[in-house]
Amino acid sequence: MSILITGGAGYIGSHTCVELISAGYDILVVDNFSNSCAESLRRVEQITGKSIKFYEADVCDKSALRIIFSENNIDAVIHFAGYKAVGESVEKPMMYYENNLMSTVSLIDVMEKYGVRNLVFSSSATVYAGDNPMPLTEDMKLGAINPYGKTKLFIEEILRDLCSAKDNWCVALLRYFNPIGAHKSGLIGESPKGIPNNLMPYISQVAVGKLQRLNVFGDDYDTRDGTGSRDYIHVVDLAKGHVKAIQWAINNTGCEAFNLGTGKGTTVLELRNAFVQVTGMDVPYAIAPRRAGDLAEVYALPAKAKDVLGWEAELDISRMCEDAWRWQSNNPMGYEIDNTIDILK
């Protein structure tokens, strides 16, 4: 069975490639490297001992997608490709709407043309409205507050409408919470370009000496220590969730949303302290003012994923910190090899 992975060279995509190959699937990847690096795919090949069929293309390019589908017998698609920085989306909303929405519409059109109707979509907990009680369940009120989150929400609506109109499609909407960690080999992990937007790579880059200190935005929230609390999930657990979702999509029809989280909140300082305890590295920090729009806590109720997909998170915060540090300490500059697909040949 062959799975096309759009954006498969990215952080979550590369880990999902490993898990799909380990589960016995054939995979092919399309990526344009706007948020990723070809070196990650070479390392996936190193981890799995399998070569990866790869196309360097933009998913917005419908003609390129037609070539990919015409040359391969594809059974299902996992759609990761898209811009993903919240701050950048506020500054450049039209870029996000054009890229994220058009890439999905182009992909759907080509999938339908070639009779491929099983799709797993990389969504986000940012689709939930900010006034929901915790924990978040899939049937709660939706209402993203930034352009990035709105693109995820709009795409979910597009896919729901698609499945309502065509009863032979099956779509799994996977709402991620906060993926961190890395593969246990230390060969692949999160390699943000520039200053990290997410907490764990920021912590690990302070520990490795790339950044001076961690800025903690607010210490007066109604949480255990006053800092914001989030549902952190190991990226390998998240990747395994995609394998379960593909299995479900191939055997069902309709459109369903699933929370992929642990069901537990961890505060900023708890994560920082766990990292220090596990690694023995110092992570100096300073308290900064709250950021506009940040909530005190966000965490999932992942019961539906367990009941329907047979999936649940297994790896704890200590393991997330251990694996994140192994990746960062082995790769202090992230993926350093030139961003060219020649390394895969």
Image: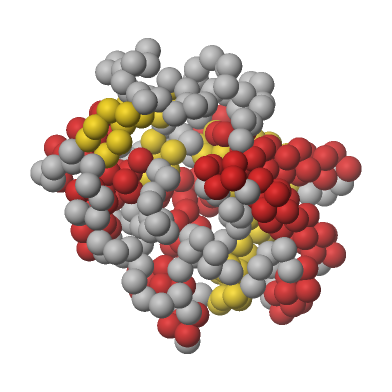
139 up-or-down from 11: above or below = above
User: Residue visible at 53% across and 52% down?
Assistant: 243
Q: Quadrant of the N terminus?
A: bottom right
256 up-or-down from 119: above or below = above
- Residue 33 x, y percent position in the rendering: 53, 68
User: Residue visible at 36% across and 29% down?
Assistant: 217
User: Residue visible at 25% across and 50% down?
Assistant: 211
Q: Quadrant of residue 2?
A: bottom right
Q: Quadrant of residue 68?
A: bottom right
Scheme by which the image is coloured: secondary structure
Left or right of 91? Residue 185 is left
74 up-or-down from 212: above or below = below
- Residue 59 x, y percent position in the rendering: 68, 64
Q: Is residue 28 visible?
A: yes
- Residue 126 x, y percent position in the rendering: 57, 34
User: Residue visible at 32% across and 29% down?
Assistant: 288
Q: Is residue 119 visible?
A: no
Closest to the observer, 238 or 147? 147
Left or right of 151? Residue 316 is left
Total marks shown come to: 0
Left or right of 102? Residue 177 is left
Closest to the observer, 342 or 345? 342
135 up-or-down from 325: above or below = above
Closest to the observer, 153 or 312? 153
For this orientation, the residue located farthest to the left is 280
- Residue 41 x, y percent position in the rendering: 45, 70
